[in-house]
Image (cartoon, grey):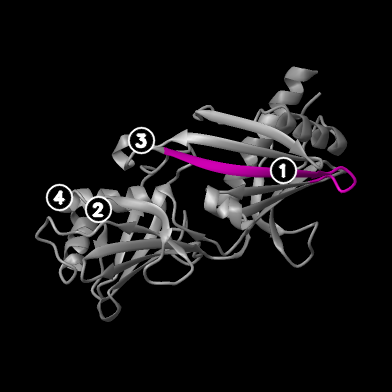
Amino acid sequence: MGGSVGSFSYTPNSDSLACPGEKSVLSDPIDGVTADKLFEGVEKYIRGGKTKAGKETEFDLTEKDGAVHIKQVFNIPEIFGGGTHTVFQIYKFDAAKLSIEHQFFAGPKIFESGTPNTTNRSVIHADPCRVEFWQEAHEVRASGPMLKGMMEKVLSMMGSKAKAHCDQSSIAVAGKNSVTSDPIDDVSVTADSYFDFFKGFLTETMQATELPDGTIIEERSAMMDVLGIGTKSFAKHVIKMDENHLYCYEYGEDESLTEMVGVTHVQVHKEPFRLEQWNIQSPGRRAGPSQAGIVKPFIDSILKFLSESS
């Protein structure tokens, strides 16, 4: 038993059936499977460890109070500084409501905080069987290996041997964590000239576009795709010289630059010259094309799993 993979589509920003007045990704009716059977398939698939990405060096699955806890460890390519990156996921199931909650934590510090980067919510509706999905983004501060890799690329382009370190005590904001560099004293670039250098790095190396007002628009490839989930994304860089600060407004796949998903901050420190970087995710409910791109392959995998199990 199982619906036909790819025989139906998902509509982003649809009127929610589960939460009137909100928006969700909503599937077409799924033929050949009941809501109960699909929910059962989702639970078996996750509890059976089928969500393993295949790129991990470590995949640990445990169960606690009915929830599934997953820890995944990935190697970071040497080009981004090497080492490993650990993510955590928690799945909770409500059979009475045919709903699944999926919490995603992008690193140990975020996991320790207890607040996930995102909570993905799925509800399976009956008569006809349809899947509703939305994502709740939480306001979390990131200072992990991905940001460290970005900083180390810039340090390398400067010609500096200074290293970046993730999850360090912030220099700019007491009580918070950031990626911080060693003192930078082995290159011609200084704290005062850094943003001129960085503009050149963006426009020449990263092929970004500088607008007349000094704002820089960047289209990013999936080059940071360590976890196998990267996609093309868009960002707007705004440099505030009076603050020695860069604000990088990030919009995910939204080429229109209207739906902001987060802000990456870079603070330039003087005496000694050091860089500090962190990201703050924009909170909110998301149900756009990016979210449709999450739920579609997942449900396709469940339907294939059900078909092969029958």
User: Mark 3 vs mark 1: which is more N-terminal?
Assistant: 3
User: What numbered label is drawn on residue 154?
Assistant: 2
Residue 184 appears left or right of 106: left
- Return the residue nearer the eye: 3 or 214: 214
Q: Nearer the viewer, mark 4 or mark 1?
A: 4
User: What numbered label is drawn on residue 77?
Assistant: 3
Q: At which x and y percent is residue 89?
A: 63, 43
Amino acid tagged 4: Gly
| Vertical placement of residue 287 versus 232, above or below | below
Amino acid tagged 2: Val
Is residue 293 on the magenta stretch? no
| Vertical placement of residue 302 versus 204, above or below | above
Residue 138 appears left or right of 132: left
User: Mark 3 vs mark 4: which is more N-terminal?
Assistant: 3
Amino acid tagged 3: Pro
Give yes or no for contact between labels 2 and 1 (Cβ–Cβ under 8 Å): no
Extreme residue toward the right, this view: 96
> Badge 4: how crowded within 10 Å, few (<14), some, or many (20+)?
few
Mark 4 to mark 1 CA distance (whole Å): 44 Å
User: Mark 2 vs mark 4: which is more N-terminal?
Assistant: 2
Q: At which x and y percent is residue 173?
A: 43, 72
User: What numbered label is drawn on residue 79?
Assistant: none
Which residues, given as a range, are shown in magenta? Answer: 84-99
Give yes or no for contact between labels 2 and 4 (Cβ–Cβ under 8 Å): no
Provide the residue designation for mark 4.
159
Provide the residue designation for mark 1.
91
Mark 3 to mark 2 CA distance (whole Å): 16 Å
The local secondary structure at tag 4 comes to loop
